[in-house]
Amino acid sequence: MKLRGLYAVTDSQLLAGKFLAYVEAALEGGVTLLQYRDKSSDEARRLREAEALRNLCERYKTQLIINDDAELAARLGVGVHLGQTDGPLAPVRALLGHKAIVGATCHASLALAEQAVSEGASYVAFGRFFNSNTKPGAPSANLELLEQARIKLHIPVCAIGGITLENAAPLVARGVDLLAVVHGLFGADSSAEVTRRARAFNELLQIK
Ligand SMILES: Cc1ncc(COP(=O)(O)OP(=O)(O)O)c(N)n1
Ligand SMILES: Cc1nc(C(=O)O)sc1CCOP(=O)(O)O
Ligand SMILES: [Mg+2]
């Protein structure tokens, strides 16, 4: 199955008090991948929330990805996203099996992306493309990188960092497969607006 579409990424602060309601609203609008991104060390809460997301994802036929934590991903039987400081990818691929989705952060580097491909990544993520509310200090990437990536890489390419409905079109025009979004999706005033945004991202990607 080709990975293509909206990649919704949760943020525990932004979604405080409306976590499941907003996630379900996004799934209602259509989400290809949902990433559980929680940087806390509260293991019990992380397990509880990740299990709740897995149940929701099963209902909506969406694939769940856990950020950073391969052990939690293995426990739940879902995918994982690893950054450059989250440990080597190959042993995680071996742990999760060949069918699992394993994503890799590659910042603005094609060399990192080629390395990730050789270690068994399912997709590579480049960013950040715009100013990000969620991670303002992330290294920046530019649109030309995506053109090179399209030529050199033969796995799905994900873009992340400050993506909104207003600025996403040039990313799509350069062949991005996955748009990974926190604030541009979940920074909405209502769950109805989250659903509207998810649908609009899918229209941009010409999905459904
Ligand atoms: C889809 C996607 N792309 C990039 C990242 C960033 O991963 P990382 O560099 O490990 O940073 P943290 O998210 O762990 O702070 C991501 N999570 N998802
Ligand atoms: C988690 C993350 N990683 C990034 C990277 O560039 O690697 S940017 C980012 C935050 C994405 O959130 P928002 O859509 O609110 O900018
Ligand atoms: Mg990480």
Image (cartoon, rainbow, N blue to C red):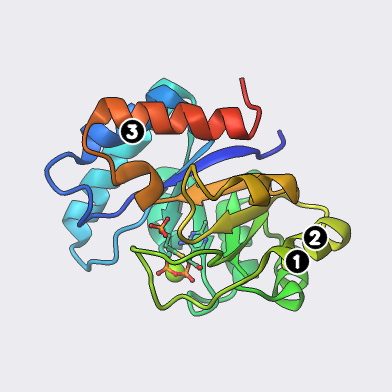
Q: Residue at x 73, y 46 (%)?
A: 173
Report whether residue 60 is seen: yes
- The label number, if any, that marks residue 147 in the structure image: 2
Q: Nearer the viewer, residue 169 or 36?
A: 169
- The label number, if any, that marks residue 144 in the structure image: 1
Report whether the residue tagged 1 is closer than 8 Å to ligand 2: no
**Helix, strand or loop for disc 1:** helix
Give the number of the mark in front: 1 or 3: 1
**Helix, strand or loop for disc 2:** helix
Q: Residue at x 80, y 60 (%)?
A: 147
**Helix, strand or loop for disc 3:** helix
Residue 97 location (% of width, % of height): 62, 51
Name the kind of residue labelled 1 in the image. Answer: Glu
Within 10 Å of disc 1 (Cα), the crowding (few <14, some 14-19, many 20+) is: few
Name the residue that disc number 3 marks. 194
| Quadrant the C terminus occupies | top right
**Would you say 63 lies left or right of 45 here?**
right
The answer to which quarter of the image holds residue 145 is: bottom right
* Cβ–Cβ under 8 Å for marks 2 and 3: no
Residue 128 location (% of width, % of height): 53, 67
The answer to which quarter of the image holds residue 133 is: bottom left
